Image (cartoon, rainbow, N blue to C red):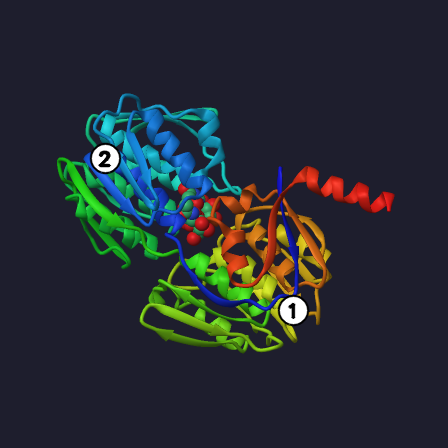
């Protein structure tokens, strides 16, 4: 088991470049199953979730090659449409293979997905939508078998703008008979990126990023080359780390429009933001100001994935901030760990009240989920003394080479083995 060891209170300075968005890469890789030929995907981040997805593609019979940040998938030789239960359970987004495989192979056999423990996260909207497109679905405990000779377009009204359900419908309907309309789709930038990829392959998807998406089904998709958009959640994580340490950093490969919901929050915290030609300079004050209220909502509102990293920064702000989580019901599990640093945060139902403290103290904590784990790293960077963040497998799901990027910004953070901590402890006890 690996651990991050952090010696805190080093002000972050310097420049960092964003890697490709995890939440774009995963659906695009799943969609590559539909392509007759090669999908050449640039800016594909080397994350554990991406590695699992590539392993699924290989198991399905695709040829997969990685050359630095480019991944080439050739789905011509797909030989099975079954995904192994153990792999499925590690990653929720593997549900997106469902739509892709029915369209490609006529049948798909998968298990209910796993992923971060941030709520119950059902897949009812995915299943209902695929049924509307004509799929016959049999559920047996945690296994799902889904078949259709050829999916047929339909009008689908989503009761909630689910990112995953929108993506599954777009992928499944791209190669179908007739027209599909999605009313109330998710509008996240990653939805637009998926539509752009599919359209480059010959799909006809209109209105991604708007309140209605129309998909005219085509017979097949062809090879294409695509660059994944930069990771906006990674950007807000760096911004939070900079804010928490009173730093000044430049973040390269920024898409300002993707970050427009989070910029006002950093302004309210007293940070100064300068945008120039795809780069963002953020300069934090010595002591952050509180933020009155953050409410997480689907895009274009404040993203749920950014709330944990920002909560860590607000833990050292002057005054009381409030965060209301509206997407996932269990997204404050990291708070009990954050309080071990001396933070003063209370959670009542879906609301966190953060009474900023002057200083955090290093702590021995464990990551409860991906973004909550990033929040603990940020707390460690801001805290006096040494911090150990355990269970960092969660963090590796979404942050590539995190510790090295932070080190380049002046942080003192190392990835160490569990045993090294035990050895250090026993040496301390002996001396
Ligand atoms: C995606 C992102 C995740 C982000 C989330 C919200 C990926 C790989 N993950 O997750 O990082 O936090 O969007 O922006 O892109 N729901 C149902 N039934 C369904 C589907 C969803 O009830 O069939 C509920 C979920 O439990 C949740 C809410 O809808 O409460 C939003 O989920 P959704 O937008 O689908 O998130 P994901 O696609 O899982």
Residue under the image location 47 percent in, 62 percent down: 236
291 w.r.t. 252: above or below: below
372 w.r.t. 250: above or below: above
Circle 2 crowding by C-alpha within 10 Å: few under 14, some 14–19, many from 20: many
- Give the camera-side residue of 274 and 313: 274
In the rendered view, does 148 fall on the left or right side of 410?
left
Mark 1 residue element:
loop
In the rendered view, does 91 fall on the left or right side of 318?
left
In which quadrant of the rendered view does residue 270 lie? bottom right
- Give the camera-side residue of 275 and 135: 275
Looking at the image, do the residues carrying marks 2 and 1 touch, with CB atoms under 8 Å apart? no
Residue under the image location 24 percent in, 42 percent down: 40
| Residue 153 coordinates in the image, percent (x, y) | 19, 40
Mark 2 residue element:
helix
Q: Earlier in the sequence, mark 2 or mark 1?
A: 2
Circle 1 crowding by C-alpha within 10 Å: few under 14, some 14–19, many from 20: many
166 w.r.t. 320: above or below: above
As measured in the structure, the alpha-carbon distance from the residue carrying label 2 to the one carrying label 1 is 48 Å
Q: Quadrant of the N terminus?
A: top right
Residue under the image location 57 percent in, 49 percent down: 330
- Checking the image for residue 34, the label placed there is 2
- Give the camera-side residue of 101 and 20: 20
| Residue 208 coordinates in the image, percent (x, y) | 25, 55
- Give the camera-side residue of 395 and 279: 279
* Outermost residue toward the front in this view: 431
In which quadrant of the rendered view does residue 340 lie? bottom right
- Checking the image for residue 316, the label placed there is 1
Q: Is residue 78 visible in the rendered structure shown here?
A: yes
- Checking the image for residue 114, the label placed there is none
């Amino acid at each position: 088991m690996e651990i991050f060891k952090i010696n805190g209170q080093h002000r972050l300075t310097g420049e960092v470049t964003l890697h490709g968005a995890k939440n774009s890469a995963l659906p695009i890789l799943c969609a590559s199953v539909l392509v007759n030929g090669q999908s050449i995907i640039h800016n594909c981040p080397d994350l554990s979730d991406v590695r699992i997805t590539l392993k699924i593609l290989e198991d399905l019979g695709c040829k997969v090659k990685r050359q630095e940040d480019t991944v080439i998938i050739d789905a011509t030789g797909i030989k099975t449409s079954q995904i192994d239960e153990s792999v499925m359970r590690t990653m929720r987004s593997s549900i997106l293979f469902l739509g892709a495989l029915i369209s490609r192979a006529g049948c798909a056999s998968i298990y209910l997905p796993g992923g971060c423990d941030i709520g119950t996260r059902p897949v009812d909207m995915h299943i209902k939508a695929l049924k509307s497109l004509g799929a016959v679905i049999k559920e047996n405990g945690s296994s799902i078998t889904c078949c259709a000779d050829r999916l047929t377009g339909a009008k689908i009204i989503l009761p909630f703008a689910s990112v995953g359900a929108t993506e599954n419908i777009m992928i499944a309907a791209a190669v179908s008979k007739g027209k599909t309309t999605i009313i109330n789709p998710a509008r996240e930038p990653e939805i637009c990126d998926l539509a752009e990829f599919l359209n480059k392959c010959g799909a006809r998807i209109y209105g991604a990023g708007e309140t209605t998406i129309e998909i005219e089904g085509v017979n097949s998709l062809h090879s294409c080359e695509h660059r994944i958009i930069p990771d906006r959640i990674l950007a807000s994580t760096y911004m939070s780390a900079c804010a928490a340490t009173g730093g000044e950093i430049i973040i390269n490969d920024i898409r300002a429009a993707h970050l427009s919901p989070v910029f006002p929050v950093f302004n309210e915290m007293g940070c100064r933001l300068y945008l120039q030609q795809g780069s963002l300079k953020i300069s934090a004050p010595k002591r952050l100001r509180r933020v009155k209220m953050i409410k997480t909502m689907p895009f274009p509102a404040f993203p749920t994935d950014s709330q944990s990293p920002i909560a860590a920064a607000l833990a050292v702000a002057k005054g009381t901030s409030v965060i209301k989580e509206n997407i996932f019901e269990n997204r404050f599990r990291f708070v009990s760990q954050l309080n071990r640093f001396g933070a003063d945060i209370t959670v009542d139902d879906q609301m966190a009240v953060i009474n900023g403290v002057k200083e955090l103290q290093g702590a021995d904590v464990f990551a409860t989920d991906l973004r909550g784990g990033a929040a603990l790293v940020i707390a460690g960077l801001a805290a006096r003394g040494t911090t150990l963040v355990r269970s960092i497998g969660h963090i590796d799901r979404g942050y590539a080479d995190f510790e090295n990027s932070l080190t380049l910004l002046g942080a003192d953070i190392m990835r160490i083995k569990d045993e090294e901590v035990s050895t250090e402890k026993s040496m301390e006890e002996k001396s």
